[in-house]
Image (tube, rainbow, N blue to C red):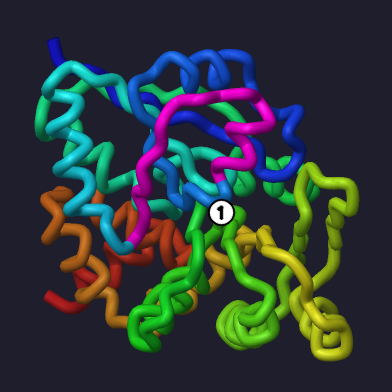
């Protein structure tokens, strides 16, 4: 029988957040694939885990995944850990998981810490709907496209950022989104955990004066639904009613329902749309 892949969440700071189930699993599997074995050996030594490790990181994620899959197909159980938190979130583990599914290997996840969720719950912003963006890409065009999408995002936005890029990212967010509420979290679960509830403009002013330290999770307020609807309405007002009707009818909506939707988008009665279209015939 083939072995399994165990996604094992490890602490993002406080070692007491390591779950008994993860400790037991790391002791019982045949091999541990770690993002940085030099970092992970400290964790394993702390919990007296003697299982052998192999490296699995961004620069060998495809080639090494094939090796790990071969091992599992031969019956070995393998645990995947990242430097901190839950594997496969902004992490090369997602590639291994995908390839395991393609190879018919069972994957199971052992829940535990995740910096994005921890920061969201601390943010004071809406947690009902949120999107996780991770690190913004280095490629300028790709980053511009993502920021353009985030302008319209009504859900709470979660991003990661390194200290040496924080000011630049705050500048880009402020330029793209305008003034928004933001919560910056660093040193999560550690002794000097810091949660700063502020605005994009104030955060930018602060970190132009104060040197950022540590890895940051940024939780940014989404566009309000009222603002979003007003912008949509203004956008439709600038377009001819015929084009607005064609938009819905091209999606298979019948003429009567399309009139109803157009009227709602424009904040007018269905009778007005009907009268206009009648006059245009």
Which residue is pictured at 28% across the width and 72% down the height?
276
Which residue is pictured at 85% across the width and 51% down the height?
193
Q: Where's residue 40, x and y in %?
A: 55, 43
Q: How many marks?
A: 1
- Neighbourhood count class around disc 1 (C-alpha, 10 Å): few under 14, some 14–19, many 20 upward: many
Say whether residue 225 is magenta. Answer: no
Q: Where's residue 231, x and y in %?
A: 52, 73
- Residue labelled with disc 1: 155
Q: Is residue 22 left or right of residue 252?
A: right
Q: Nearer the viewer, residue 240 or 53?
A: 53
Whether 39 is drawn above or below 86: the answer is below
Q: Which residues are magenta?
A: 40-58
Say whether residue 41 is magenta. Answer: yes
Q: Is residue 56 left or right of residue 164?
A: left
Which residue is pictured at 22% across the width and 40% down the height?
98
Q: Is residue 174 left or right of residue 78?
A: right
Which residue is pictured at 24% across the width and 20% down the height?
76
């Amino acid at each position: 029988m083939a072995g399994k892949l165990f996604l094992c969440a490890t602490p993002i700071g406080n070692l007491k957040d390591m779950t008994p189930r993860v400790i037991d699993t790391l002791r019982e599997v045949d091999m541990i694939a770690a993002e940085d074995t030099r970092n992970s050996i400290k964790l394993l030594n702390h919990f007296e885990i003697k299982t052998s490790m192999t490296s699995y990181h961004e620069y060998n994620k495809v080639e090494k995944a094939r090796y790990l899959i071969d091992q599992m197909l031969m019956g070995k159980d393998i645990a995947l850990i990242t430097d901190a938190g839950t594997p496969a979130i902004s992490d090369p583990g997602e590639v291994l998981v995908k390839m395991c599914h393609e190879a018919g290997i069972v994957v199971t996840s052992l829940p535990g810490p995740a910096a994005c969720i921890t920061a969201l719950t601390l943010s004071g912003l809406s947690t009902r709907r949120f999107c996780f963006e991770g690190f913004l890409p280095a490629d300028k065009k790709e980053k511009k496209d993502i920021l353009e999408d985030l302008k319209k995002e009504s859900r709470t936005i979660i991003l990661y950022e390194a200290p040496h890029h924080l000011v630049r990212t705050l500048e880009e967010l402020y330029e793209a989104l305008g003034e928004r509420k933001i919560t910056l979290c660093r040193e999560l679960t550690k002794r000097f955990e810091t949660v700063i509830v502020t605005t994009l403009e104030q955060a930018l002013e602060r970190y132009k004066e104060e040197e950022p330290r540590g890895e940051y999770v940024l939780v940014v307020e989404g566009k309000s639904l009222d603002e979003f609807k007003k912008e949509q309405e203004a956008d439709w007002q600038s377009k001819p009613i015929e084009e607005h009707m064609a938009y819905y009818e091209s999606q298979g909506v019948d003429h009567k329902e399309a009139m109803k939707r157009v009227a709602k988008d424009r904040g007018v009665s269905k009778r007005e749309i009907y009268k206009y279209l009648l006059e245009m015939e």
